[in-house]
């Protein structure tokens, strides 16, 4: 097997102790959420929930390219480069017709150390694979929904053609250049003891990195005990111990740009707060603004449950690492974010 199999680490490896670094002059990450739409309806995702039952996600389907360019231009105002610019969110990024050009614009601006994209790879045909590599994508993270046609159909709700995924990844790997091919599968998609070995056999020689990730309860709108299968939800998404932290670390190190231009403080499937629209404000101004400071103080002060979305959110505990825990530094940090 050529690929490296990882567990209990992020795709970029070592993680800083967040409490020691705060406040951040530059966020570690900006997640660009380019399309509020998906060609899958995976049973663990909010797209399996009727739209009228969801809270605020985005008021617009597609991120406007000119607004996106302003976003990238705004990032130049920060004193440092982002550690990561990630194209992901509640939807399939490859549905955006300008996705490769968007990545190219960011790569040329040199605003991030790494430019990642997370995709189900069903739309990753040869031309688009070539365009993404040429654009300067650092890492393409491919999320699998099973190792058989039947399991793919059960989980995705719309798609069964595993052979097409294998073909797409095979071609991408062959032309990848400096782009890392990262293939991951969720443990709830492994329905039989031999499925993990089948995953390694299918993708071990056509990927740089492989990971078996763990199901996380991403939204209270889904009964995860129903979709978990053999997954226990005893570990975080990346395989760390689940902490009892009551402070979500995401508003302290990241931002997400929604398709409607709204900036939000985390990557939850429903947004707890809109900090502002980048059409009207600079990203640096919003990052350092009073609305986000107030939201951070709410978490540091043990008042997370005052926000309706945060109150029901478990996602952050399953998406964090021990280095992200802020609870022991809450009093000190509350004074920092005044």
Image (tube, rainbow, N blue to C red):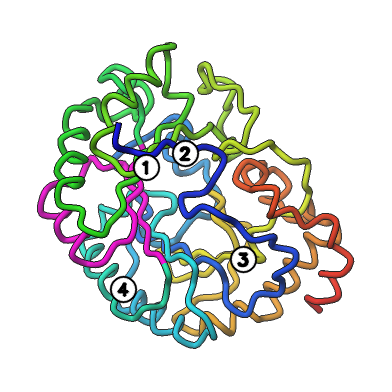
Question: Badges 2 and 3: C-beta atoms under 8 Å apart?
Answer: no
Q: Which of labels 4 and 2 is toward the front?
A: 2
Residue that label 3 marks: 253
Q: Nearer the viewer, mark 2 or mark 3?
A: 2
- First of labels 1, 4 by sequence position: 4
- On screen, residue 94 above or below 293: above
Q: Earlier in the sequence, mark 2 or mark 1?
A: 2
Label 1 packing within 10 angstroms: few (<14), some (14-19), many (20+): many
Q: Residue furthest right?
A: 331
Q: Are marks 1 and 4 in contact (CB under 8 Å)?
A: no
Q: Which residue is mark 4?
A: 107
Residue 308 position, x and y percent, is 71, 51
CB under 8 Å between discs 2 and 1: yes
Residue 142: image tag: none
* Label 3 residue SS: helix
Mark 2 crowdedness (10 Å alpha carbons): few <14, some 14-19, many ≥20: some
Horizontal and vertical percent position of residue 32 = 42, 64
The residue sitting at 48% across, 24% down in the picture is 188
Quick check: 196 left or right of 250? left
State the mark number for residue 6: 2
How many angstroms separate mark 2 from mark 1 (CA)? Answer: 7 Å
Task: Locate residue 214, reporting x and y percent.
Answer: 53, 32
Task: Give the label, 1 or 3, closer to the camera.
Answer: 1
Residue carrying label 1: 209
Q: Which residues make up the magenta segment?
A: 114-143
Does the segment drawn in magenta span residue 134?
A: yes
Disc nearest the viewer among 1 and 4: 1
Name above or below for residue 301 compared with residue 169. Answer: below
Q: How many marks?
A: 4
């Amino acid at each position: 097997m050529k690929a490296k199999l990882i567990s209990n680490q992020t795709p970029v490896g070592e993680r800083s102790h967040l409490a020691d670094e705060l406040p951040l002059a530059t966020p570690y990450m900006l997640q660009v959420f380019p399309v509020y739409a998906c060609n899958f309806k995976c049973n663990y995702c909010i797209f399996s929930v009727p739209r009228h039952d969801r809270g605020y996600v985005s008021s617009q389907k597609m991120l406007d390219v000119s607004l996106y360019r302003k976003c990238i231009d705004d990032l130049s105002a920060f004193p440092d480069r982002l550690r990561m610019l990630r194209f992901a969110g509640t939807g399939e990024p490859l549905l955006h017709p300008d996705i490769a050009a968007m990545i190219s614009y960011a790569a040329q601006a040199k605003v991030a150390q790494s430019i990642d994209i997370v995709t189900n790879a069903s739309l990753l045909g040869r031309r688009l694979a070539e365009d993404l590599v040429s654009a300067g994508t650092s890492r393409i993270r491919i999320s699998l929904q099973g190792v058989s046609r039947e399991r793919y159909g059960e989980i995705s709700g719309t798609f069964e053609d595993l052979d097409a995924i294998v073909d797409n990844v095979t071609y991408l790997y062959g032309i990848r250049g400096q782009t890392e091919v990262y293939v991951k599968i969720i443990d709830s998609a492994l329905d039989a003891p031999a499925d993990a070995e089948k995953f390694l056999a299918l993708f071990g020689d056509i990927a740089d990195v492989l990971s078996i990730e763990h199901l996380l309860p991403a939204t209270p709108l889904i009964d995860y005990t129903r979709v978990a299968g053999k997954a226990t939800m005893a570990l975080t998404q990346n395989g760390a111990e689940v902490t009892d932290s009551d402070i979500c670390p995401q508003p302290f190190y990241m931002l997400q740009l929604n398709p409607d231009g709204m900036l939000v403080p985390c990557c939850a499937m429903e947004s707890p707060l809109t900090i502002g629209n980048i059409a009207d404000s600079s990203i640096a101004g919003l990052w350092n603004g009073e609305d986000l400071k107030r939201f951070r103080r709410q978490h540091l002060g043990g008042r997370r449950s005052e926000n309706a979305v945060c109150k029901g959110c478990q996602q952050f505990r399953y998406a964090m690492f021990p280095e992200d825990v802020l609870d022991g530094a809450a009093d000190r940090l509350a004074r920092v974010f005044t």
